[in-house]
Image: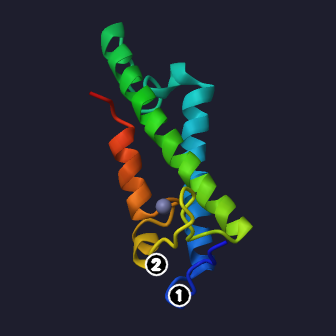
Amino acid sequence: MTKPPDDPQLDLDAIREELEARRDAVGGRVAGLAARPELGSAQGFGKRIGDGTIEAVSRLTEIGVGRSLESGLARTERALAKLDEGTYGVCDSCGATIPAGRLRAMPDSVLCLTCAAAERRVAPRRR
Ligand SMILES: [Zn+2]
């Protein structure tokens, strides 16, 4: 197994704190959207809209936001799990060491640059 990068610049405690704060903030928003979708747009911004169309549109936008929040949340939770496992900074896909600079820029990175790029190439759609 590849050992995590031994970079004195990388403060794992600070990273954990940031990831946990992010998880709590995003988790709260996702839970809020999931629990009471009917209150999300109408009460949240103090609007009382008689016309259902505007509400439906903002509901759709909110669902989209919720989805991207959820995938971000999954990555944040995975990064936290890796901190617990002692594999933080090791690529989940190929086991390569993730550069400290990338981790500092994106603390929730669980893939190295190569695998992240490969995933982006595969994910969208095939010809
Ligand atoms: Zn990799």
Residue drawn at x 62%, y 74% is 2
Residue 46 at least partly seen: no
Near mark 2 (Cα within 10 A), the count class, few <14, some 14-19 or many ≥20, is some
Q: In which image quadrant can residue 117 be found?
A: bottom left
The C terminus - image quarter = top left
Residue 69 at least partly seen: yes
* Amino acid under disc 1: Asp
Question: In the image shown, does 3 or 15 lie closer to the viewer?
Answer: 3
Q: CA distance from mark 2 to mark 1?
A: 7 Å
Residue drawn at x 35%, y 23% is 58
Question: In the image shown, does 76 or 85 lie closer to the viewer?
Answer: 85
Image location (x, y in percent) of residue 16: 62, 69
Query: Within 8 Å: ligand 1 and the Cβ of disc 2?
Result: no
Q: Secondary structure at mark 2?
A: helix
Image location (x, y in percent) of residue 86: 70, 71
Near mark 1 (Cα within 10 A), the count class, few <14, some 14-19 or many ≥20, is few
- Residue 18 lies, with reference to residue 10, above or below; the image says above
Residue drawn at x 37%, y 16% is 55
Q: Secondary structure at mark 1?
A: loop
Q: Which residue is mark 1?
A: 7
Task: Answer left or right for 127 relative to 80.
Answer: left
| Label at residue 100 | 2
Image location (x, y in percent) of residue 32: 58, 34
**Among numbered discs 2 and 1, the one appearing first in the sequence:** 1
Task: Answer left or right for 50 relative to 74.
Answer: left
Direction right: furthest residue: 85
Task: Answer left or right for 1 relative to 99.
Answer: right
* Amino acid under disc 2: Ala
Whether pointer 2 and pointer 1 mark residues with C-beta atoms closer than 8 Å, the reply is yes
Question: In the image shown, does 26 or 109 lie closer to the viewer?
Answer: 109
